[in-house]
């Protein structure tokens, strides 16, 4: 790790988060990768990092039950991801998929780069310092799979109107 030219981190949590299959390997070193995909072109991209990734995976299942195709992208290092070739970044976050939701139990700053003008960010803004059991706080702030799925469904539903507002046709 000391000889590595890029970011190095030791990531720990006191939270009881599930260990998800596919979250280790070469793609992690690229800073971002497709963790769970759908068949065909996704209707929405669910972008998350760290302890929030499992919420995106659970939301994907909820959305599938509603007929919405979602791709889950784990983005543990935006710096490493941004350093990848454009073709790789476009394969992970297809530019044609404008409906995107970033899930970040921190500040939203910077996530708009990945969600774009048609996406949404579920984050904590100016709400630090809450004191309660973790599950209670996360539910209060909307960090549940059901809420992620609702946000994603709303982004997908709003897309045609947003495209029309800027003079574009539905793709």
Image (cartoon, helix red, strand yellow):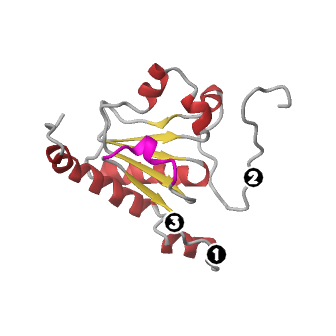
Task: Give the alpha-carbon distance from disc 3 to disc 2, as whole Å.
Answer: 23 Å
The residue under the point 22% across, 47% down is: 159
Disc 1 marks which residue?
Answer: 129
Pinpoint residue 104: horizontal percent, then vertical percent.
Answer: 53, 55
Does the image show residue 46?
no
Q: Nearer the viewer, residue 106 or 19?
A: 106
Residue 75: x, y in percent? 55, 40
Q: How far across and down, in percent of the image, does residue 9 sit?
A: 75, 42
| Image quarter of the N terminus | top right
Q: Does 100 appear above or below 37?
A: below
Query: For the residues carrying marks 1 and 2, which lies nearer the camera in this image?
Result: 1
| Dot label at residue 125 | 3
Residue at the disc numbered 2: 12
In the rendered image, the residue lying farthest to the bottom is: 131
The question of residue 151 being in magenta is answered with no
Mark 1, residues whose alpha carbon is within 10 Å: few (<14), some, or many (≥20)?
Answer: few
SS label for mark 2: loop
Question: Which is more N-terminal, label 2 or label 1?
Answer: 2
Badge 2: residue crowd in 10 Å (few <14, some 14–19, many ≥20): few
Q: Residue at x 47, y 45 (%)?
A: 47
**Which residue occupies the extreme front position in the image?**
166
Seen at 62% across and 32% down, the residue is: 28
Q: Is residue 64 left or right of residue 9?
A: left
- Secondary structure beneath dot 3 equals loop
The stretch in magenta equals 109-117
Against 26, is 7 above or below? below
């Amino acid at each position: 790790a000391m000889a590595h030219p890029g970011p190095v981190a030791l990531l720990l949590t006191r939270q009881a988060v599930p260990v998800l299959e596919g979250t280790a390997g070469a793609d992690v070193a690229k800073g971002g990768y497709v963790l769970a995909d759908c068949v065909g072109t996704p209707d929405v991209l669910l972008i998350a990092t760290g302890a929030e990734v499992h919420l995106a995976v659970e939301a994907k299942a909820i959305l599938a039950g509603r007929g919405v195709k979602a791709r889950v992208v784990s983005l543990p290092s935006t710096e490493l991801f941004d350093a990848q070739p454009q073709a790789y970044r476009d394969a992970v976050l297809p530019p044609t998929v404008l409906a995107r939701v970033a899930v970040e139990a921190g500040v939203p700053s910077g996530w708009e780069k990945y969600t774009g003008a048609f996406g949404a960010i579920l984050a904590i803004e100016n709400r630090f310092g809450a004191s309660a059991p973790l599950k209670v706080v996360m539910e209060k702030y909307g960090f549940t799979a059901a809420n992620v799925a609702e946000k994603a469904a709303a982004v997908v539903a709003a897309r045609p109107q947003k495209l029309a507002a800027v003079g574009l046709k539905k793709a």
